Amino acid sequence: MTHSVRITVNGEAYEGDVEPRALLVQFLREQLGLTGTHVGCVVGECGACSVLVDGVLVKSCLMLAVQANGREVTTIEGLRRGGRPHPVQEAFVNGFALQCGFCTPGFVMAAHALLARNPNPTEEEIRRDLSSNLCMCTGYVQIVEAVKSVGSDPGTGRHRGQTPERGDSTP
Amino acid sequence: MFPADFDYVVPRSVDEAVAMLVHYGDDAKVLAGGQSLIPMMKLRIASPRVLIDVNGIAELAGLRRDGDRLVLGALCRHADVAASPLVREHLPLMHDAAQLTADVQVRNRGTVAGSLAHADPAGDWPAALLALDTHVTVAGPDGTRTVPLAAFLVDAYTTQLGANELITQVAVGIPPGRTGGAYAKFERRAGDFAVASAGVQVTLDEAGRCAAVAISCGAVAPSPFRARAAEAMLAGQALSEDLLAQAEHAVRDEASPFADTRGSVEYKRHLAGVLVRRACVAALARARGERVDTLHL
Ligand SMILES: Cc1cc2nc3c(=O)[nH]c(=O)nc-3n(C[C@H](O)[C@H](O)[C@H](O)COP(=O)(O)OP(=O)(O)OC[C@H]3O[C@@H](n4cnc5c(N)ncnc54)[C@H](O)[C@@H]3O)c2cc1C
Ligand code: FES
Ligand code: FES
């Protein structure tokens, strides 16, 4: 038996029918074509599928699509402001906080949620909070640095101590 | 990897949820945070025909103080506990456990009541709350009943909960003054289940001796247990380093872990003792009014 749902995703309302067993991440990727939200493990271990539901960070592979009925979902596609990348996205680019990029949407969402709660986290707080997300490429150092840089200088995404060679490769 | 097909129903009240549980019987499962149930359904360890999603029952949300008790509704999430100033002030052991359970996303969804219902032998809430004065209230077709947590937890993944019963709340006694508690957990990597864990709640008398103590251990037996031999050693005594070392040894003997990928029997016994001692030291300091941050080991 399918259920009709109305879910607001990145500010736009979507109506559709979902099977109860469809996961939120499936709905986003397959029904809406929002493939920015990635699927790594599908069992809640990797954080690649992280999105915000009513502003709360969740793993969209551990929530049913039907449970998002009547709620507001924000995915990585919804972080852009006025055509510009979000400061956390800029910080990831400027700080080379990704290699293959598979984990990046999840990390950006998790970092965004952390910074919303705690605008100036310490390195330890960043490491502890982001331990929910796995990255197989970077070794995490640049990710932590990137998040720190947003914390220290909101808006520009520039780490105060960042050298021009590292920071200014992107206009 | 997706769950087998099921029907999905959304009760708006406890009565309605119980009526649904009665109607569907063994075919149905309650869906709370879904952070254990959804993975189990995907792995096809569980294939309920009906999911009763209780997340819309407003009366089950959040936590509040009710006289000398802290009352957690069945939908109180791990993150609600972690963020509560009331918990931090009166029941720091619970603050520790909330911070050390899983990761941010899981804490935002997973519930304390769901953890107790799931009764994972390595789960943090069953172990942590066993060291406190904890009662579980369940609603069923014949009304509600309230049982002490120790009786509620029967064995690994097994509780007293009947197929047509719903946990409605978990109540924890707010301790008297000069009481401190701490929960310590050792995990292989951040956010993982415990290799071993320990909860300690100590009340001191005016002379600074141990007036009352409760010690619980998680992940080192088929289900969490109270370390009664160690408790008996500490009760009524001045808690010297020597005495804590003796309690540590007693805990090693009381534990009955099995070997798995998380460690050998000897290793886990050793760990259980060490964690009890560390939790004791933190609990004592808190009982004396000192500030001690959650132990991230
Ligand atoms: C990546 C990951 C890491 C984790 N790490 C940890 C960890 O370190 N420590 C830890 O303790 N846990 C951990 N967990 C488990 C997590 O804490 C779960 O939230 C918890 O075990 C179950 O709570 P839930 O609300 O999600 O329950 P659900 O998954 O919704 O339900 C679990 C079971 O309880 C039953 N149930 C739930 N609520 C009720 C109720 N009110 N009345 C009757 N029955 C009910 C359900 O029917 C089901 O059988 C982890 C989970 C994940 C995915
Ligand atoms: S895909 Fe959801 S946590 Fe890995
Ligand atoms: S950049 Fe490749 S997994 Fe993180």
Image (cartoon, helix red, strand yellow):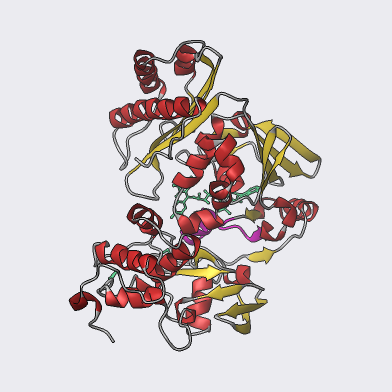
Give the x, y percent position of residue B26: 66, 50
Image quadrant containing the N terminus of chain A: bottom right
The reply to whether residue B126 is in sight is no
Q: Quadrant of residue B50?
A: bottom right
Q: Quadrant of the C terminus of chain A?
A: bottom left
Residue at 66% x, 59% y is: B55
Q: Is residue B233 above or below residue B49?
A: above
Residue B36 in magenta stretch: yes
Indicate the quadrant of ligand 3 in the picture: bottom left
Give percent across and percent down for residue B253. 37, 19
Residue pictured at 40% horizontal, 82% vertical: A85
Q: In the visual, does A20 lie left or right of A84?
A: right
Left/right placement of residue B87 relative to residue B197 reads: right
Residue at image point 52% right, 12% down: B207
Can residue B277 be seen at all in this image of the molecule? yes
Q: Nearer the viewer, residue B58 or A113?
A: A113
Q: Verify whether residue B295 appears in magenta.
A: no
**Left or right, residue B113 beside residue B214:** right
Q: Is residue B24 above or below residue A8?
A: above
Question: Along the line of sight, which residue is nearer the eye, A108 or B53?
Answer: A108
Tell whether B106 sits left or right of A154.
right
Q: Nearer the viewer, residue B294 or B76?
A: B294
Q: What range of the chain is rendered magenta?
A: B33-52
Instruction: Tell how many labels.
Output: 0
Q: Position of residue B8 (x, y in %)?
A: 66, 65
Q: Residue furthest bottom?
A: A83
Q: Nearer the viewer, residue A65 or A118?
A: A118
Query: Residue B29 is drawn in which quadrant?
Result: bottom right
Q: Position of residue B202 (x, y in %)?
A: 52, 23
Q: Is residue B92 shown above or below A76?
A: above
